[in-house]
Amino acid sequence: MHLNRRSLLAGAAASTVLSISVRAQILPPAGFATPSGTLPFPPDVYRERRARLMATLKDGVALIHGAQRGSTSGPVSPPFYQSGDFAWLTGIVDEPGAVLVLAPAERTYREFLLLPSRDIETERWDVERLPLGSQIEARTGIQRVRRVSALDALVTGIAARSHTLHFMGPIASAGSPVPPALDLYSRVMARVPGCTLKDQSALIPALRTVKEPRELDLMRRATAATKAGHLAAMKAVRPGMTERQLTAILEAGFRDGGGEGLSYDSIVATGRNAASLHYAHGTAVIGAQDLVLIDAAASVGTYACDVTRTFPASGKFTPAQRADYELVLAAQDAAAKMLKAGVIHEDMTEAANAVFRKAGRIDEFTHGLGHFVGLDVHDAGDYTKPLPAGAVLTIEPGLYNQQANQGIRIEDLYLVTATGAERLSTGIPRTVEEIEVFMAR
Ligand code: GLY
Ligand code: MN
Ligand code: MN
């Protein structure tokens, strides 16, 4: 699915994003737009994260590539989605093709940002970019800013001194292209004898999994905005509306609740459409007997949320709908009850599966139980390791039945604590009673 967590909600964006940058950043001089600085936190936050990473690496060289610009078929630039790892370490979300180089044991400069060359013709269409110099270094908080044309020589030089090459991941499948860092390392190893290649792909996900208080604060704000949108939609829904009309009400609610962007394209699916997991069309008319599924969330300060609610268009569940809904809720509760620091994710999945299996409905639950959420809606993290306190993840069981013309999913966001979990997405009607009472008001 297309996850446009950094796309902006019309109207909210200009003022809110700017207010963050005015408070926290060195503002660009007139005429030079990118890199615009670090978002959503000031440069020292990212410097401290890089220092933590370098303290673990100790020596050698590590490469973290930012995302490239997507391809376009028309004259308008496609939206740019920065890599989560790169954004978490730099706060730079607006320079496609950038590379971060970390060299923990170098004598003077230990972090380098390499940006693509300027192209005056492209800048006339797209955005004007800063020249190299102390200003760009002050704005990004990175010691040395260079052009990517210097990357090969820089990495070769560090490798010749340190002989350790750290691969920071993510691990790509064998059928996909070789990651650019490994491609460069293989060329370096062909020229510098005695280099060692180390797999460090677990390091950044482990750091990103445990949310900092400042990150949790933004995620709580994203969740409050998400709640406002879901409540608005649940209140306004009427048979005869199109999915798209309901989407407009939902997203206006996000904006009114303080949302700045969407965590991903909103899924608003009525009746049978809800049995297609990532349905995103919107032209169907909501029927009087339909269950409506909304999987949608606002973002704040580039941090995501992820919530799904399913409710009857009429405001009242039929007995059959109610029984199915309560089965999904029981599966969610069974998994949530197990959630605390130290639990293995698979054991939570088994707890939810057991509920469906006992009811003879396991074949209708056709996706994973949930995922980490943070800067990315499907955030970095290792599902095979015990969950750490400070992780945020969804629990989102569902039942999908095309024959019955319905799909039900209930998705909430949880913060893992030492003793249990806190449901962050509170206050959005979740039980049958809560939904029916709220919709009757
Ligand atoms: N909204 C996408 C998901 O639930 O994973
Ligand atoms: Mn999800
Ligand atoms: Mn979702």
Image (spheres, rainbow, N blue to C red):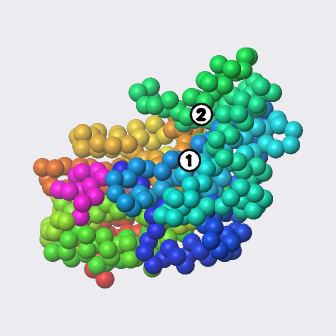
Residue shown at the point (75%, 57%) measured from the top left? 133
Label 1 is placed on what type of residue? Gly
In depth, the one of 67 and 228 nearer the eye is 67
Residue positioned 33% across, 76% down in the render:
249
Q: Is residue 258 above or below residue 310?
A: below
Look at label 2 and name its amino acid: Ala
Badge 1 marks a residue whose secondary structure is loop
Mark earlier in primary sequence (1, 2): 1
What is the distance, in whole Å, between disc 1 and disc 2 at their CAs?
13 Å
- Quadrant in which the C terminus appears: bottom left
Do the residues under discs 1 and 2 have CB atoms within 8 angstroms? no
**Rendered image quadrant of residue 65:** top right
State the extent of the magenta-drawn residues as a range. Answer: 272-282
In the rendered image, residue 388, in percent from the top left (x then y), is placed at 61, 44
Q: Which residue corresponds to mark 2?
A: 181
Question: Camera-side residue: 417 or 167?
Answer: 167
Q: Please tell me in which quarter of the rendered image ligand 3 is found.
A: bottom left
Q: Which is nearer the eye, 370 or 118?
A: 118
Pair 1/2: label in front: 1
Return the residue found at the far front: 121
Q: Is residue 77 left or right of residue 233?
A: right
Q: Is residue 350 visible?
A: yes
Question: Which residue carries the number 1 mark?
Answer: 97
